[in-house]
Amino acid sequence: MRWRTLWAWSGAIASVVWVGCSSERQSSPQPATVASSAVKEAEGQLAGLLEEDWEAYLREEPTFASLQGDTRYAGLWEIKAPRR
């Protein structure tokens, strides 16, 4: 590319940026918000589901539970010892 062409393009780009920055932007309307009680209820339901899933995982994987410091399921460990 020739330097004149490059100089012309840089001037054109600068003027477009300047015009775009100087124009006033209209504020967009705020999105409708969901009632806070409905959000809190949904968060509570999600937390309950996650807690239930976590407890089920710990029951199914007692070794992992013990490694996490939860000894409630320590009696469920599978003993995998070599046969004699």
Image: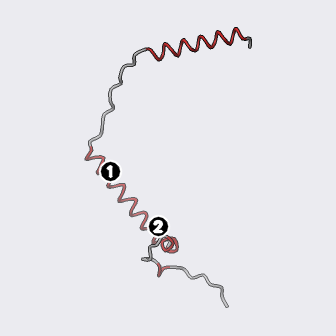
Residue lying farthest to the right in this orientation: 2
How busy is the neighbourhood of tag 2: few (under 14 within 10 Å), some, or many (20 plus)? Answer: few
Q: Quadrant of the C terminus?
A: bottom right
Q: Position of residue 67 (x, y in %)?
A: 51, 72
Q: Quadrant location of residue 31?
A: top left
Q: Quadrant of the N terminus?
A: top right
In this image, 48 relative to 37: left or right? right
Q: Residue at x 52, y 74 (%)?
A: 63
Compared with 39, 54 (above or below) is below
Pointers 1 and 2 in contact (CB under 8 A)? no
The amino acid sitting under disc 1 is: Ala
- The tag on residue 57 is 2
Q: Secondary structure at mark 1?
A: helix
How busy is the neighbourhood of tag 1: few (under 14 within 10 Å), some, or many (20 plus)? Answer: few
Compared with 28, 80 (above or below) is below
The amino acid sitting under disc 2 is: Tyr
In this image, 79 relative to 43: left or right? right
Residue named by callout 1 = 42
Q: Nearer the viewer, residue 39 or 7?
A: 7
In this image, 4 relative to 77: left or right? right
Q: Position of residue 41 (x, y in %)?
A: 29, 51
Q: Nearer the viewer, residue 4 or 47?
A: 4
- The tag on residue 78 is none
Q: Nearer the viewer, residue 16 or 3?
A: 3
Compared with 25, 56 (above or below) is below
**N-terminal of the two: label 1 or label 2?**
1
Q: Quadrant location of residue 34?
A: top left
Q: Residue at x 39, y 62 (%)?
A: 51
